[in-house]
Image (cartoon, coloured by chain):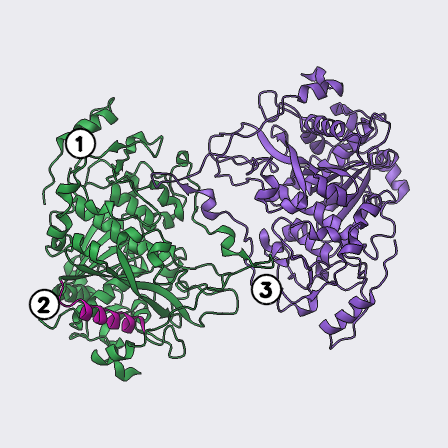
Chain colours: A purple, B green
Amino acid sequence: MAISLSKTFLSIAHQVFPSEKCRPVSFSGREPQLQRTTSMGFATRSLRMPRVSSKTSGSLFSSIDELDKETREERRVADVWREIHGVDDWVGMLDPMDPLLRSELIRYGEMAQACYDAFDFDPFSKYCGSCRFTPRQFFDSLAMADHGYVVSRYIFATSNINLPNFFKKSRWPKVWSKSANWIGYVAVSNDEISKRLGRRDIVVAWRGTVTRLEWIADLMDFLKPISSNKIPCPDSTVKVESGFLDLYTDKDVNCRFCKFSAREQILTEVKRLLEIYQLEELSLTITGHSLGSALAILSAYDIVETGLNVLQDSRAVPVSVFSFSGPRVGNVRFKERMEVLGVKVLRVVNVHDIVPKSPGLFFNENVPLLLMKMAERLPWSYSHVGVELSLDHKNSPFLKETGDLSCAHNLEALLHLLDGYHGKGHRFVLASGRDPALVNKATDFLKDHYLVPPYWRQYENKGMVRNEDGRWMQPERPKLDDQPEDTHRYLKQLGLASHH
Amino acid sequence: MAISLSKTFLSIAHQVFPSEKCRPVSFSGREPQLQRTTSMGFATRSLRMPRVSSKTSGSLFSSIDELDKETREERRVADVWREIHGVDDWVGMLDPMDPLLRSELIRYGEMAQACYDAFDFDPFSKYCGSCRFTPRQFFDSLAMADHGYVVSRYIFATSNINLPNFFKKSRWPKVWSKSANWIGYVAVSNDEISKRLGRRDIVVAWRGTVTRLEWIADLMDFLKPISSNKIPCPDSTVKVESGFLDLYTDKDVNCRFCKFSAREQILTEVKRLLEIYQLEELSLTITGHSLGSALAILSAYDIVETGLNVLQDSRAVPVSVFSFSGPRVGNVRFKERMEVLGVKVLRVVNVHDIVPKSPGLFFNENVPLLLMKMAERLPWSYSHVGVELSLDHKNSPFLKETGDLSCAHNLEALLHLLDGYHGKGHRFVLASGRDPALVNKATDFLKDHYLVPPYWRQYENKGMVRNEDGRWMQPERPKLDDQPEDTHRYLKQLGLASHH
């Protein structure tokens, strides 16, 4: 998809940077219409999107008004959603960067970010490890109602696996669950947004790690045949990192939240939703950041390998992954199997982030093929899957120099980089004016002169409230939903019921 | 003042501790009536005060109803306020602990605590170093309207002195002031509370340090004649710690907030208020925690030494200091001079706190008199003033073992200890049921099983709000009050105007 350079934009750009030669930037007049319908969680945008130039960085609020092309853009995502979804492996869409793809990536990235914003990771909370909100209130509570999705199910995982730095446990005697952690959600686009998107979109969003980067050290660095955890696979040399696999398939029959594995929860829910919407045009979009990206890739594989995405009328619902800052998941055989199955993966990474370089720092897809072939049967030969979109935080004039690895790994920072990315060698210009203040929600990454406090996202008095006697206490939350009644029925349909 | 043991309370106590022999505690039926009229800042209390027993510590909320003695107690503070204010040096009121004195101490302690709660000490705030609220909204904003006081003036100090760890400076280029820090306030009791108190009470509350304990190291450990900073004193051997003295007397003519010294601000404001209320019964009560206690003692001395508290009709308004966790301020001559002047000081300390042991760890009032006499002229011979009320946090079953010195120094913890104190050797029983959760506002001191998060006091999103464009930013505050117009007039009356 070629991007035409908008003359109008160029002339506007001249007004903004009058003193310098305005180098053409790949900036299409065809602006992402979805930005108007999505409130970006902690961001909101005015109807007319301001564009913030990096060169006027003394203030976050310099902007040029966008020309109003609403009518013309209205039908665009609906027209090209398959390309955005990766049917052609995003060929020609990444350099220069397709504006619609960019805004869609940001939109899915924000749905992954929602997993962090909603997660209660305060070890001093009675509900540590849970989601702060009910499924029904999820997007409203995050000021993301404009995204136009409805959460249909929460996903939980058991912490009885060997990833000590992934799970969050309360400092108190546990009150809501002995072993469960909330790990993501399934959501469906509503009628209005489905119309704009050109299809009913089922989203699975997986939470990553809220601890800094210690969890990388927890990885066993051990590739395990995917079939050994009872995920169907015709080839026992298809292997994935054992920690991810266990996280995906393990359960705890004694816990009402994770008596089904994350896998079982996802498969039954996707099956249920595909049945409900089987007569419509459909897509499955799976997203996640960091470790959540690994689960996104694994679950996407699983859904297609089991044939879950094939409807009764034999239509195959396309399954794509938008991965952010994700590690490698499996070996080269896994990568090849993903390709055979047609699971599309677009991986957005920051080149300075160490997580996408893990595990398999030594034997990976960059090693010459012959050596790779030799190493293939070694447990530490990992390979990335899909297509990479590589960004560099040093290109953003909003960000300061830092040696803090968690900055380079931060999802909000990555979404900021996406918003400023127009192609390799193109100048960093925020396309939608996405609020750079969001970068500092959980980092100290923005330059000081923007006056945005680092790590500013926090709850008033850590959620303590005064009860009717005037005493400060942690309020009770509504009873947490556990697993839906009909999970067994769908497990049976999937041939998985025998495990119960 | 002897405390009679209430038989009614004993019988109630038996119901609460049925399984153990109920040891008599010094617990008077004459409960502090003021608790009903004060909301305790972050605490509030129900009209019927619950008493929380330390022995039922599995829950914070076990309580026994207090008998309703409201009518009988109604006039008590008005009747005995001079004793509470220290006219008899609190003889007989501390062991066993007089319940009215206890509740009054807590009330003044909360007015000192308000200085912390209202202070903006976030280095990433544009208003770092200021008070978060306007004087008019001060007590309302802290939910302390029930205290019945009105702030009449804020006090600022210049940071151009040698106490680097006391002052808070913004990480940003300074926006509200180059060198000022908000350091306390003057307040006056309203008509209603004045009636209950038996007099119009003028309160000066001094803020202490919000940094941990590094400021102790900043102290020069150098005693300086009080007269050398132009505070009148008939005896040049009366000396105080130079850091406290400078903090009290220094100014910055280029700053609209501290173009008058803290001393000048206090003296003019007290003079103004005494003129307004000169026909009423009056008291001056000065309070402060930590370094704020040093300023409280110094300013109390100053007010009496300059004769400011003597009204036109020759009545001397009693001046008392309620000091919390305060360091030594001056030498033994200073202490003697305070006694001659009749400035009453009640110092509440936690025995495990190192601040009251500073400065002058080696030469102080515990050294034999002869040695003291020899050391008198050495710059490091310090002496405490007034009467000490010594508490021990190990007596509170709510608190955990900790080696954290800032816990032992914490004001909220000290107020908690006061509430449970009934005399030496008496069991720790919360008299008013003051919410123990307050202890953890800025510490990790409460036992874990109370489910109160440590350091729980924080502002939502560090005060960031979304502007009309949906962008996150630090809101502007109303223009900060600087110095009142009429300060010069009062300075002139005080004979201090020549410095300007």
Q: CA distance from mark 3 to mark 1?
A: 60 Å
Residues in magenta? B261-280
Q: In the rendered image, which quarter contains the C terminus of chain A?
A: top right
**Dividing the picture into quarters, in which one does residue B359 lie?**
bottom left
The amino acid on which the numbered mark 3 sits, given as a three-letter code, is Tyr
Query: What residue is pinned by disc 2?
Result: B315
**Residue B98 position in % (x across, y down):** 16, 45
**Residue B260 position in % (x across, y down):** 32, 75
Q: Earlier in the sequence, mark 1 or mark 2?
A: 1
SS majority, magenta: helix
Q: CA distance from mark 2 to mark 3?
A: 57 Å
Is circle 3 on the same chain as circle 1? no
**Dividing the picture into quarters, in which one does residue A141 lie?**
top right
Of residue A199 and residue B321, the one placed in the foreground of this image is A199
When the figure is inspected, residue A206 is found, relative to residue B496, above or below; the finding is above
Residue visible at 18% across and 36% down?
B68
User: Any mark on residue A450, and which?
Assistant: 3
Query: Callout 3: few (<14), some (14-19), or many (20+) C-alpha neighbours within 10 Å?
Result: some
The amino acid on which the numbered mark 2 sits, given as a three-letter code, is Arg
The number of callouts visible is 3
When the figure is inspected, residue A177 is found, relative to residue A201, above or below; the finding is above
